Image (cartoon, grey):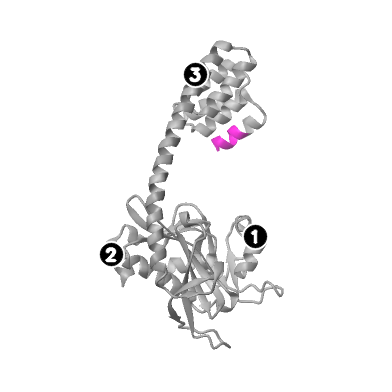
Amino acid sequence: AFMTAAKACSKHSNQEEAVRLLDCMKQHNVTPNIQLYNRVLMCCSNSNVALKVLREIPDQTKMSVGTVMRICVREKRWKEVSILQQQLAELNKADDSKKKRKFDEISENNEEEEKKYAKYQEQLKTLEKIGKGKTSWRRVGVLSLQRPPPASNLTSIHLGIQSHRNPAVNGLSVVFMNGNEKLGYMLIRNRREEGSLKSSLLGLFLDRNCRGMGLSTQCIAMWLFLCRKLNVIPEAEKINKPLLSLALKKFGFEPRPGGVQLEISPLTTQAQGNAHHVPTVQVYSPERKILSGVFTERALRGQDLVISTTPPNPRGKVVWVGIGFTHPCCHDGKKAEELQD
């Protein structure tokens, strides 16, 4: 709310209201961040006011000092300009030093990552390579389908790996193949954070002909099994697909703070559609406008969804979208054992 007010003040160059906003925050024991201070400085037209605000900022930045210096130049306060130039030079020097340290760290990390990536590529070559060029993949195994699709002789799917095109991301795609036909894929990003190895699910896509077969559940189970075997912490980054959110919920994943809560349920009546969009699942929330903001028309078509204007009967299952997920095994030994089982 304070930032919104500060933006409004800067839009109308209202110095008086911006300074009053800072006073109001102090009365409510709210500490302004540097972004809000910079917004207030953008409202200032008087150098005395700008200098006073600048002195309140505990960690001044080049932007805050530069903004005040321009105001002083406009009022020809050369003594203050000289002092601010010295501050700006010190900030530039500190920034250069920080960048050099960061560059050295990145260089060391890149050298280590290059060694790991080279080792990974050598291990990858032990797997059978299928195809050529960007579409090639490495065969890992075969997944037997518990519920083969009707009117199809598909009883198993080949699992493979495709490396991410950007090695620095340290990601991979687990692909689902039927001969040369790609049926879907699961995006995963692996990294080391705070001394722990983490594997993040970025997304999962299945061809329409493979949906409703329980394939997504089997793939997540396989991923969690590998995470447990390799002592890797599983998590999911921002998920915008209700069905994928539901699958994660089945395995005990919990949403991070934030996101959008909604109900998901199968359609009980035939919804209007066309050749490119025949909804099979409905989503509902009392705040319909929120769902309209979360799901574009393209997203609804791609996921075979429709937004319901009334609560489903019977009520649907509650899921979260627009947020990441963590698993209790990260901090609960008992849950970790259950996951291993």
The span from disc 3 to disc 1 (Cα, nearest Å) is 51 Å
Question: What residue is shown at x 34% (from left), y 58% (from top)?
Answer: 330
Q: Residue beneath label 3, please? A: 86
- Judged from this view, the residue extending furthest toward the right is 274
Which amino acid type is marked by label 2? Lys
Q: Are marks 3 and 2 in contact (CB under 8 Å)?
A: no
Q: Amino acid at mark 3?
A: Gln
Q: Which residues are magenta?
A: 1-7
- The answer to whether residue 317 of the structure is visible from this angle is no
Residue 79 location, quadrant: top right
In the image: residue 299, left or right of residue 173: right
For numbered disc 3, what is the local secondary structure?
helix
**Residue 4 versus residue 327 in the image, above or below:** above
Q: Mark 1: which amino acid? A: Thr
**Residue 168 on the magenta span:** no
Q: Using residue 333 as the reference point, say whether residue 255 is left or right of it.
A: right
Q: Nearer the viewer, mark 3 or mark 1?
A: 3
SS at mark 2 in the image: helix
Residue beneath disc 2: 334
The quarter of the picture where residue 170 lies is: bottom left
- Using the image, determine if residue 330 lies above or below residue 194: below
Return the mark for residue 296.
1
| Rendered residue at 58%/25% (across/down) | 67
Q: Position of residue 174 (x, y in %)?
A: 47, 69
